[in-house]
Image (spheres, helix red, strand yellow):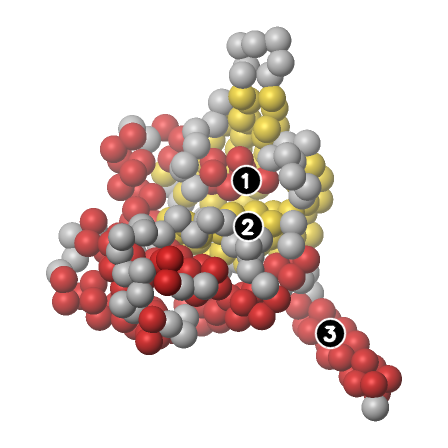
């Protein structure tokens, strides 16, 4: 799926003396299989942009095209179905259903899609194994660490086989080890399955993994650059080598 944003605006309190221009005249194209970080300071509008792309919020004006569908014009019922079937969401606060186990949280969206119970169970178990949590399948969220909950959220986002995943500050509440493990999982899924990942973040640990970085400031695209991951990986290896030599 190709995402195309055309002259996108989002203004809050627009009929007051103090309108907030969260997104202003954004024109972007994101192709299938990209690994994109939208970065910027708090209040820059990056989360609003992510919500507009994912159909969680509606624009004040402009268009959000996903292939040949302008989701900003869909009736609510059709929009809900479109999000369910095509878009995965990973939230900063995990947003897991607290009364359901890890397995049941992952199964839930597939059940809403009408899949057979056996199909839901098989795919959910496979995804939990893929994110390293098969042995945690019967635990409810409060019995799991933050890193484990976020992995369940990743598995849940991938359960309906979405074409792209929206991740809003997914590492904000995680320690360095959990962040590295989570990003390894998402990067592998991006590379092996072609899943598009779009992050809203100001975490440098996420930004260094991105293949494309969009810098957002005051509701506008300030910079849009492609990252040479080969050079970046080489630079990281060289830095690690130098550090090892210094510590020897």
Contact, CB < 8 Å: mark 3 with mark 1? no
Q: Badge 2 is on which residue?
A: 169
Is residue 11 visible in the rendered structure shown here?
A: yes
CA separation in Å, label 3 and label 1: 29 Å
Q: Earlier in the sequence, mark 3 or mark 1?
A: 1
- Taking the image as shown, residue 173 lies to the left or right of residue 149, namely right
Q: Residue at x 46, y 49 (%)?
A: 93
The one nearer the camera, 148 or 197, is 148
Q: Earlier in the sequence, mark 2 or mark 1?
A: 1
Give residue 154's position: percent from left, percent from top: 41, 60
CA separation in Å, label 2 and label 3: 23 Å
Give the quarter of the image for residue 230.
bottom right
Secondary structure found at label 2: loop
Contact, CB < 8 Å: mark 2 with mark 1? yes
Give residue 80's position: percent from left, percent from top: 29, 38
The one nearer the camera, 25 or 12, is 12
The one nearer the camera, 234 or 68, is 234
Q: Is residue 243 above or below residue 223?
A: below
Give the quarter of the image for residue 234.
bottom right
Give the quarter of the image for residue 219.
top right
State the mark number for residue 180. Answer: none
Graded by Cα atoms within 10 Å as few (under 14), some (14 to 19) or many (20 or more), the crowding at tag 2 reads many
Q: Earlier in the sequence, mark 2 or mark 3?
A: 2
Q: Residue at x 47, y 60 (%)?
A: 146
Q: Badge 1 is on which residue?
A: 47
């Amino acid at each position: 799926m190709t995402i195309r944003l055309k002259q996108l605006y989002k203004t809050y309190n627009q009929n007051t003396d103090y309108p907030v221009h969260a997104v202003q005249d954004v024109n972007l194209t994101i192709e299938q299989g990209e690994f994109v970080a939208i970065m910027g300071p708090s209040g820059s509008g990056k989360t609003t942009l992510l919500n507009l792309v994912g159909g969680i919020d509606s624009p004040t004006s402009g268009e959000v095209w996903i292939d040949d569908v302008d989701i900003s014009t869909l009736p609510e019922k059709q929009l809900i179905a479109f999000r369910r079937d095509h878009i995965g969401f990973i939230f900063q606060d995990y947003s897991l259903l607290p009364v359901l186990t890890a397995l049941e949280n992952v199964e839930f969206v597939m059940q809403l899609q009408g899949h057979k119970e056996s199909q839901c169970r098989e795919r959910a178990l496979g995804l939990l194994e893929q994110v390293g949590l098969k042995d945690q399948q019967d635990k409810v969220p409060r019995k799991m660490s933050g890193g484990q909950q976020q992995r369940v959220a990743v598995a849940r986002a991938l359960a309906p086989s979405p074409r792209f995943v929206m991740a809003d500050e997914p590492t904000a509440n995680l320690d360095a080890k959990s962040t590295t493990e989570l990003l390894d999982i998402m990067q592998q899924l991006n590379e092996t399955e072609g899943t598009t990942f779009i992050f809203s973040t100001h975490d440098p640990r996420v930004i260094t993994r991105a293949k494309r970085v969009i810098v957002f400031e005051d509701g506008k695209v300030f910079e849009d650059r492609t990252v040479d991951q080969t050079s970046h990986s080489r630079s990281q290896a060289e830095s690690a080598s130098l550090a090892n030599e210094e510590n020897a």
